[in-house]
Image (spheres, rainbow, N blue to C red):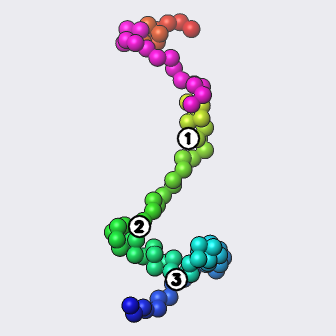
């Protein structure tokens, strides 16, 4: 298969770190980029999620508190039970 050369601009530190990573997998930077491009064409999409994969710190804290039962309201078995609790003087 014939190949063509393509020039792309990459931050030099990113390039070095990527080369080191891919070399640890036994791949060249060129092979890794070709893998990415082939998978993109095969899937007709970027082959990984783009965006903020992790919730922010506020959300992480809320999740942890919910798992511990902190700040949760008690459960109710009926609307009247809920209304009674809402109208109760604390």
Q: Are marks 2 and 1 in contact (CB under 8 Å)?
A: no
Return the mark for residue 73.
none
Image quarter of residue 82 = top left
The x and y percentages for residue 18 are: 60, 74
Measure how far apart labels 2 and 1 are at the Cα level.
27 Å
Question: Quick one: SS at disc 1?
Answer: helix
Residue 9 appears in the picture as rendered:
yes
Return the mark for residue 59.
1
The x and y percentages for residue 51 are: 48, 58
Question: Quick one: SS at disc 2?
Answer: loop
Residue at 46% across, 79% down: 34
Residue at 60% across, 28% down: 68
Of the two numbered discs 2 and 3 in the rendering, the one whose residue sits closer to the viewer: 3
The disc, 2 or 1, on the residue closer to the chain's N-terminal end is: 2
Name the one closer to the observer, 83 or 16.
16
Residue at 37% across, 8% down: 80
Residue 18 appears in the picture as rendered:
no
Of the two numbered discs 1 and 3 in the rendering, the one whose residue sits closer to the viewer: 3
Q: Main secondary structure of the magenta part?
A: loop
Q: Is residue 44 left or right of residue 53?
A: left
Measure how far apart labels 2 and 3 are at the Cα level.
18 Å
The disc, 2 or 3, on the residue closer to the chain's N-terminal end is: 3
Tell me if residue 77 is in the magenta stretch. yes
Residue at 39% across, 93% down: 2
The residue wearing badge 2 is 46
The residue wearing badge 3 is 30
Where does the magenta region start and end? 67-81
Measure how far apart labels 1 and 3 are at the Cα level.
39 Å
């Amino acid at each position: 298969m014939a190949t063509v050369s393509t020039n792309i601009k990459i931050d030099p530190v990113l390039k070095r770190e990527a080369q080191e990573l891919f070399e640890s997998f036994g791949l060249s930077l060129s092979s890794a980029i070709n893998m990415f491009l082939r998978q993109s064409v095969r899937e007709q999409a970027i082959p990984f999620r783009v965006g903020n994969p992790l919730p922010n710190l506020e959300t992480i804290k809320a999740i942890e508190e919910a798992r511990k039962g902190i700040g949760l309201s008690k459960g109710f078995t009926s609307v009247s039970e809920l209304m009674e609790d809402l109208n109760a003087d604390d």
